[in-house]
Amino acid sequence: MIPVPRVAVIVVAAGSGTRLGGGSPKAFVGIDEHTILRHALRGVFAAPEAQVVIVAPAGREGDALTEALEAAGDRRDLVSVVAGGASRQASVQAGIHGVWPDVEIVLVHDAARALTPSDVFDRVLAAIDAGADGAIPVLPVVDTIKRVEGAEVVAAVDRSTLSAAQTPQGFRRDVLDAAYRAAKDEFTDDAALVAAAGHPVAAVAGDPLAFKITTPADLDRARGLVAPIAPVPIDLDRLPPVPRVGVGTDVHAFGGEDDLWLAGLLWPGEQGLSGHSDGDAVAHAIVDALLSAAGLGDIGTHFGTDRPEYAAAHADAFLSRTHALLGEAGWRIGNVAVQVQSNRPRFAPRRAQAEAVLSAALGGASVSVSATTTDGLGFTGAGDGVAAFAVAVILPA
Ligand code: CTP
Ligand code: MG
């Protein structure tokens, strides 16, 4: 499994976009052929690996997930979507609930800041790593600022101490959780809420491209700036690892001079089986089940009659080599179940012994052996031979 990242990014995208008036929730308004949300996620997934919680308008979670999975590429496991609330603050709160327990740093980002470059994320993270409780990107205010009451300019404001706040705003996770739990009032951003809880917040350099798409003019500006989105390649090796199952059967006829070898055990006084090697149908069925689970061919591929060293071999040789082949291919054995169909020998008294021998040859993997007769039917019922059926489950090592 992919380890839980230490950083989470909450992307708030649940607003209605009243001022933009785009006809659909703002996050789903197109900049080019892609939406504001999709563009915002490009910056998020270009930043260092993080859990990504998208806060979508209630009822649009599926659309948000579709866009997120498309944007996530190899990081699909890290994505989740939750429904937002009536205010931005309520939406962030909903996102906080979706953050995994081991995450240490949380970044809150407006989807509306769709063109935010990933290095803004880097700078915010670096400030928290350097010890800040919280850090936000800011840009100096370029316009001269006036305090205006009604139609009257009442004062000039010294802009040298003013900055415009952007997102992503980053916080130590414990600090953000506690501040949100304690918050009684509505704040305009997360930094104000955390500051009200008594924590200093550091400023790092923002980026003009992190502007918020609020009005139709902002959308036009974004349309003029946007770079086309290239498809994100998916590395198949990093898709969630899943168990694989395999099946194997084997049949051998009674015959030959020697005593019987079956399920890795010697059965003195029982007639042996004919075949290449000792004819141990149980072991051979297990080998086929394991190889088929791993997609490594079958017993003939690895132990064919052209391999004289296996001519006199018993179960342990076949099974330990198969175990090694799986290991080299990156698999470990989950469990193996095998059933023997035969009139004899009677398995019950030696079942545990057979399981122990087979398990030892497979590096300690769980092996269960069962046995049945076929009510006198078929070749096993006639006592002509033995059939074995095996199923194996393997897991990525
Ligand atoms: N947001 C949210 N939930 C809300 C309100 C806002 O998740 N209830 C998000 C928006 O989706 C946006 C960010 O907060 O990404 C900043 O909000 P704003 O730019 O105000 O977006 P809207 O609220 O959608 O726009 P408007 O205020 O014009 O309706
Ligand atoms: Mg709003």
Image (cartoon, rainbow, N blue to C red):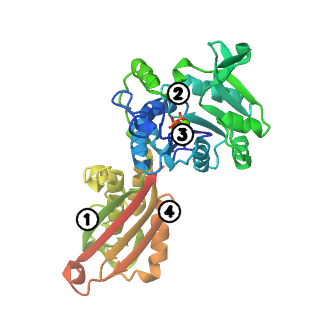
Gap in Å between the C-alphas at discs 3 and 1? Answer: 67 Å
Q: Which secondary structure, mark 3?
A: strand
Instruction: Tell me the residue that label 1 is attached to.
Output: 275
Kind of residue at badge 2: Lys
Q: Label 2: how many residues lie within 10 Å, few (<14), some (14-19) or many (20+)?
A: some
Which residue is at a point 53% across and 29% down the rendered structure image? Answer: 47
Answer with left or right where residue 173 lies relative to residue 380.
right
Q: Which secondary structure, mark 1?
A: loop
Work out whether mark 3 precedes mark 1 in sequence or the reverse, and give the earlier one: 3
Q: Are marks 1 and 4 in contact (CB under 8 Å)?
A: no
Image depth: mark 3 or mark 2 in front: 2
Ligand 1 has an atom within 8 Å of the beta carbon of the residue at disc 3: yes
Instruction: Tell me the residue that label 4 is attached to.
Output: 360
Gap in Å between the C-alphas at discs 3 and 2? Answer: 12 Å
> Residue 46 at x, y = what percent?
49, 29
Kind of residue at badge 4: Ala
Image depth: mark 2 or mark 1 in front: 2
Ligand 1 has an atom within 8 Å of the beta carbon of the residue at disc 2: yes
- Compared with 311, 151 (above or below) is above
Instruction: Tell me the residue that label 2 is attached to.
Output: 212
- Numbered badge on residue 12: 3
